[in-house]
Image (tube, grey):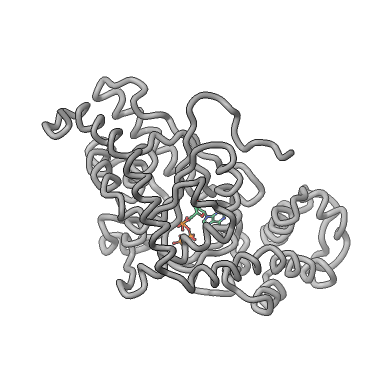
Amino acid sequence: MTEPLIAPVGTRRVFSGVQPSGALHLGNYLGALVKFVALQHEMECLYCVVDLHAITAWQDPKTLASQTREIAAAYFAAGVDPAKAIVFAQSAVPEHAELAWIFNCVARLGWLDRMTQFKEKSGKHKERASVGLYTYPVLQAADILLYKATHVPVGEDQKQHLELTRDIAAKFNHDFDAPGFFPLTEALIEGPGARIMSLRDGTAKMSKSDPSDQSRINLTDDADTIAGKVKRAKTDPLPLPETVEGLKDRPEADNLVGVYAALSGQTKAQVLAQYAGQGFGQSFKPALADILVERLSPVSAEMRRLMADPAEIDRTLAAGAARARALAAPILAQTKRIVGFTAGQ
Ligand code: AQP
């Protein structure tokens, strides 16, 4: 039996989401989707397609709905069961935006000024970034706390945002004299796929917004494309080392060995025991391509099948949104009462 991802204590609820801002990649799959599937067997889970987050950067209105369906299809194809987990689109549950406004008035500017993701995504021209991109982590806190979620499976890049969620919960509870009203949510980051790096640069995370498609393996890539990307993936001239310590200061090597380990359910040491002393191209890269194809092609085939019936995806998302609203409404009503709004009395 596999180890449970979290210890069985108290009332536990999971929330997480993915933005419909482009094709999903291996980092999203290992950092998020694989954990989503495992957790649905352990407790109540809400998995959202966070389209309100996606529009913090420009999204073509002609494609946003189909991108949203594609993320939902990726959840289902990866193994999320909509009869178990609640799967829905964020914009279908207006309570997210309402709680985000209250949290905008709880969070401090200084806290948001420290968010590294805003700095990375806004680049050199932060004055041209949307206000939504700046307050993105506040909406994320609302997503989570609207359901009083106790655990959030995410990749390592989201660690700082989860810390902010805890700060907002603690400040709300303190300022409104409501001890314990919002939980101090834990991020579930640990795991072999917590930080998958670019295939072109082992120091940059694999990302949807990287302009080079060669930097990532997309869930929808076919076998030839995957094999070509792995073959061209940056490495260094040294052979694979004997030990995990030997991967230090070799970010590309470390990343590829980590990906192989995550997909094969082995440790990096076990992978190295098999390939130490060999050049990357000899048998490691072909084996890595094989295991990627083996794991990802059933997911992409199932995504294609599901995407052929968009109306069915919409029905499933609508049913999920109704379940999500039933959980969110009383928590938001209580929050409004605590804040002192007449609508909450
Ligand atoms: N490289 C990664 N390794 C592990 N986990 C990752 N995640 C993203 N990249 C990696 C995790 O995937 C989930 C969904 O991410 P998202 O699409 O909502 O936002 P993101 O973190 O901004 O993802 P991207 O793909 O990198 O998009 P862009 O390029 O827009 O920044 C999250 O749990 C995230 O941690």
Give the position of the N terminus as an image quadrant.
Answer: top right
Q: Nearer the viewer, residue 11 or 214?
A: 11
Residue 97 locus on image (x, y percent): 26, 48
Q: Nearer the viewer, residue 135 or 39?
A: 39
Q: Quadrant of residue 293?
A: bottom right
In this view, 194 is above or below 41: below
Q: From this viewpoint, is residue 216 visible?
A: no
Residue drawn at the location 83% of the way across and 50% of the way down: 270
Residue drawn at the location 74% of the way across and 64% of the way down: 291
Q: From this viewpoint, is residue 87 visible?
A: yes
Residue 54 locus on image (x, y percent): 36, 60
In this rendering, would 151 be left or right of 148?
right
Give the position of the C terminus as an image quadrant.
Answer: top left
Count of numbered circles in the view: 0
Residue 200 locus on image (x, y percent): 61, 69
Residue 199 locus on image (x, y percent): 63, 67
Q: Quadrant of residue 18?
A: bottom left
Q: Nearer the viewer, residue 176 or 64?
A: 64
In this rendering, would 156 be left or right of 266?
left
In this rendering, would 227 be left or right of 29?
right
In this view, 259 is above or below 63: above
Q: Nearer the viewer, residue 247 or 205?
A: 205
In this view, 271 is above or below 303: above
Residue drawn at the location 49% of the way across and 52% of the way down: 82
In this view, 159 is above or below 342: below
